[in-house]
Image: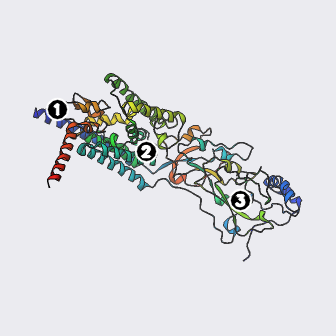
């Protein structure tokens, strides 16, 4: 009886050791293979919001609706060095709304009021149109609906706003839900260093 | 120094011909209102924006604001997740095998549900990491971070020694089902066995879809995770309904997902077969009551012996044991008596 138990113990130890060795070997292989973090990013040359001008089309808002986290991990990012800093920013104002007494459209475009408009320097009250304005996107509010991205395009804007992934929200799903729904396959996996670089919009693409 | 604002002077309408098209659009939009409200000398909007003004052309000490680039969760925080996983499994083993305390185990699993489930929003978890490990092992171009490997390996290694400690106290999917298991019934053995085959099919399918070429690959376990929608407080309606269905079923059938579908549970069960020390039931010579077998909703006590591969580490058997209870009672009584005597 006791010998039987010992034999069982021995078998158990050997089997356990074997499985541990397999697990350890597999883990070692995977760790050796690991190279940096791979994350999702919007491919701006494919995203229709980033590519198309204001052709009267509705902005594609799949990034807002399809993301698995409550407030989408995709948001609009203003690349400030490319921003025209216009007085009447077509991405900030709803330029089809009635003009108010200040000579500005009376409605804002962003449904979540996520863009802040700030004058740069002193505004000449005689000539506010020729002043520069900073448009800062409050990323905590933005849900990536793409309306401003669509409007900040030629001929009205310079295309400084693009949709980008916020890595503090993105849970890095194995298969991005937005990609699954995106008709342009505009999401791709990249090493994190590349994913943080500014968006390149390839208009031919 | 005068405020150097970039301007184009001169307001002849003729210049509009050469103006970029946006100016015309802006004018068309603005003029009706301007004519109505503002005086006639309203200046036409002239600053060209076919190029973006840079900091030196704006002047006045202007600095281009930094572009917002939130980084992913810090690497050390990801390591914290792995350490938390290991620590929670250690505590789970200690609470079940040593303390035999279901109450504290429930507290631990609520903590883990809050952290791994609701705070980390269900990602990453060992169950899903199975697919990434399979892909990384088979696709030479695919690699996974070290934390994912650790997340996958740690619960299996723990199972090799102590059984399914991960399932009982740590797994968020298990915890949410454990909490709703109000009146779990004993599932007939044959039905239990037949339904249990599903998880092997699911594991097979998950591996099959994961080893496909990169473009057609799919991650079934994540896609059909019934509870992740609750953890993220959002999700596709059909997935939320599926999760709700599992929770309703879970009120009467203990942990339906774990027992019949969880693909990682298959691997854990295999490792648990070799466990050095697991949950044990030691029938008393005098008291052969079988209350523990009646209390086990997972069919993991057969002929008064623990079937470790099915044991979910919930400690219900210990909680239901009259011996444990009696001893606790006796101790309390003794304390009372000795308290009165002194």
Q: Is residue A63 above or below residue B32?
A: above
Q: Identify the disc placed on residue B287.
A: 1
Q: Which residue sits at x=38%, y=48%?
A: B111
Q: Residue furthest front?
A: B340
Q: Looking at the picture, do discs 3 and 2 lie on one chain? A: no
Q: Dot 2 falls on which chain?
A: B
**Left or right relative to B132: residue A77:** right
Q: Residue B150 at what x, y percent from top left?
A: 36, 47
Q: Residue B204 at what x, y percent from top left?
A: 40, 30
Q: Looking at the picture, do discs 3 and 1 lie on one chain? A: no
Element at label 1 = loop
Query: Which is more foreground, mark 3 or mark 1?
Result: 1
Report the front residue among B228 and B154: B228
Question: To which residue does mark 2 refer?
Answer: B117
Question: To which residue does mark 3 refer?
Answer: A84
The colour mode here is: rainbow
- Per the model, the C-alpha gap separating discs 1 and 2 is 41 Å
**Left or right relative to B162: residue B139:** right
- Per the model, the C-alpha gap separating discs 3 and 1 is 85 Å
């Amino acid at each position: 009886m006791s010998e039987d138990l010992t034999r069982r113990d021995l078998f158990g130890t050997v089997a356990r050791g074997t499985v541990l060795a397999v697990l350890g070997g597999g883990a070692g292989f995977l760790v050796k293979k690991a190279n940096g973090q791979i994350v999702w990013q919007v491919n701006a040359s494919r995203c229709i919001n980033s590519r198309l001008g204001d052709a009267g089309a509705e902005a594609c808002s799949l990034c807002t609706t399809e993301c698995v986290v409550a407030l989408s991990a995709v948001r609009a990012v203003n690349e400030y060095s490319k921003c025209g800093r216009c007085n009447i920013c077509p991405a900030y104002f709803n330029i089809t709304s009635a003009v108010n007494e200040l000579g500005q459209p009376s409605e804002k475009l962003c449904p979540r009021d996520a863009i802040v408009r700030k004058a740069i320097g002193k505004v000449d009250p005689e000539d506010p149109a020729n002043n520069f304005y900073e448009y800062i996107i409050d990323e905590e509010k933005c849900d990536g609906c793409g309306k401003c991205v669509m409007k900040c395009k030629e001929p009205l804007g310079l295309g400084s706003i693009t949709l980008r992934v916020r890595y503090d929200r993105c849970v890095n799903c194995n298969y991005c839900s937005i990609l699954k729904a995106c008709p342009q396959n505009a999401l791709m996996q990249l090493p994190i260093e590349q994913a943080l670089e500014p968006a390149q919009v390839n208009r031919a693409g | 120094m005068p405020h150097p604002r970039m301007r184009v002077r001169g307001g002849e309408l003729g210049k509009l011909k050469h103006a970029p098209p946006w100016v015309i659009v802006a004018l068309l939009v603005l003029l009706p209102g301007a004519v109505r409200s503002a005086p006639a000398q309203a200046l036409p909007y002239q600053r060209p924006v076919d190029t973006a003004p840079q900091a030196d052309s704006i002047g006045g000490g202007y600095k281009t604001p930094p572009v917002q680039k939130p980084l992913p969760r810090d690497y050390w925080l990801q390591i914290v997740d792995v350490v938390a996983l290991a620590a929670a499994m250690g505590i789970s083993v200690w609470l079940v095998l040593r303390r035999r305390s279901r109450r504290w185990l429930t507290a631990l699993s609520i903590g883990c549900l809050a952290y791994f489930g609701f705070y980390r929003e269900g990602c990453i978890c060992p169950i899903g990491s199975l697919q990434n490990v399979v892909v990384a092992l088979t696709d030479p171009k695919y690699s996974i971070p070290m934390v994912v490997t650790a997340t996958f390996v740690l619960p299996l290694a723990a199972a090799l020694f102590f059984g399914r400690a991960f399932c009982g106290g740590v797994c968020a999917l298990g915890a949410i089902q454990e909490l709703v298991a109000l009146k779990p019934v004993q599932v007939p053995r044959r039905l239990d066995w037949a339904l249990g085959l599903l998880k092997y099919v699911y594991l097979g399918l998950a591996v099959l879809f994961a080893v496909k070429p990169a473009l057609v690959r799919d991650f079934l376990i994540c896609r059909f995770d019934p509870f992740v929608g609750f953890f993220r407080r959002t999700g596709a309606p059909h997935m939320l309904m599926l999760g709700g269905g599992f929770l309703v079923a879970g009120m009467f059938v203990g942990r339906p997902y774990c027992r019949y579908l969880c693909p990682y549970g298959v691997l854990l069960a295999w490792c648990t077969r070799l466990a050095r020390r697991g949950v044990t039931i030691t029938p008393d010579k005098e008291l052969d009551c079988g209350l523990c077998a009646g209390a086990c909703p997972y069919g993991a006590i057969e002929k008064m012996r623990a079937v470790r591969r099915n044991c979910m580490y919930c400690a219900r058997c210990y909680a239901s044991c009259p011996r444990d209870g009696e001893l606790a009672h006796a101790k309390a009584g003794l304390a009372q008596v000795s308290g009165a005597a002194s």
